[in-house]
Amino acid sequence: MWVTDITEHPTGEGKLYCCAIKDLFSNRIVGYAIDERMTAQLAVTALRTAVARRQPTGVVVVHSDRGSQFRARSFRAVLAAAGLQGSMGRVASAGDNAAMESWNALLQKNVLDRRRWATRDQLHDTIVFWIERTYTGAVDSASSASSHPSSSSSPSPPRTPPLRHDHQPTGVNLPCSSPLLAGVVVGR
């Protein structure tokens, strides 16, 4: 099961939005996108990135709130093309996406509340670093130190390779043979 949400962050240049997708099994962020506009394309890019990184098989439910970005035809089309099952929370019920809200609170505490951000690029780079290095590293440490009985009997989920984020207008093309993901560009 994957959960997703979009967060909004102020900078001296205006707002920056981050759409992240968390895999509840591995407790990792498997896809994300960051942009200065909160559009359906932001959610679509995060979802395509998650699909490219994890290449899910079987039934994977993607749960979100009822935001217009997650109700958009383009987002639903990517869900369908990837064989994913969409799920949305009830109106005025934030609790059903608590795992993602908890991650948003960690991002707020560990990155956003630390200082004021003068530029979008500064905040963008810091969010990427925090997701790829700090958050993923903490998840890996907690997973390896787990004393849960199932941790010794089942292998760890595969490590999610880090995304590259170039600040070139062309971004980075993700290698994938799926027509769904052809031409996916990550970065800014």
Image (tube, rainbow, N blue to C red):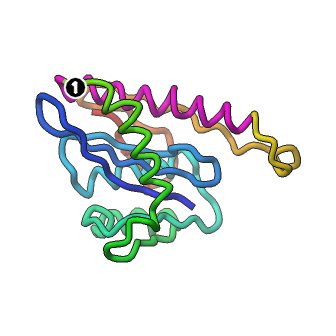
Q: Which residue is mark 1?
A: 116
The secondary structure that most of the magenta stretch takes on is helix
Q: Which residues are magenta?
A: 118-144
In this rendering, does residue 77 appear at all? no
Quarter of the image where the N terminus is located: bottom right
Image point (52%, 48%), residue name: 177
Q: Position of residue 79 (x, y in %)?
A: 44, 65
Image point (59%, 47%), residue name: 27
Residue type for callout 1: Arg
Residue placed most toward the observer, 119 or 186: 119
Residue placed most toward the observer, 8 or 95: 95
Q: Does residue 151 appear to the left or right of 62 in the view shown?
A: right
Q: Does residue 15 appear to the left or right of 136 in the view shown?
A: left
Q: Position of residue 151 (x, y in %)?
A: 81, 46
Mark 1 lies on a secondary structure that is: loop
Q: Residues within 10 Å of mark 1 (few under 14, many from 20)?
A: few
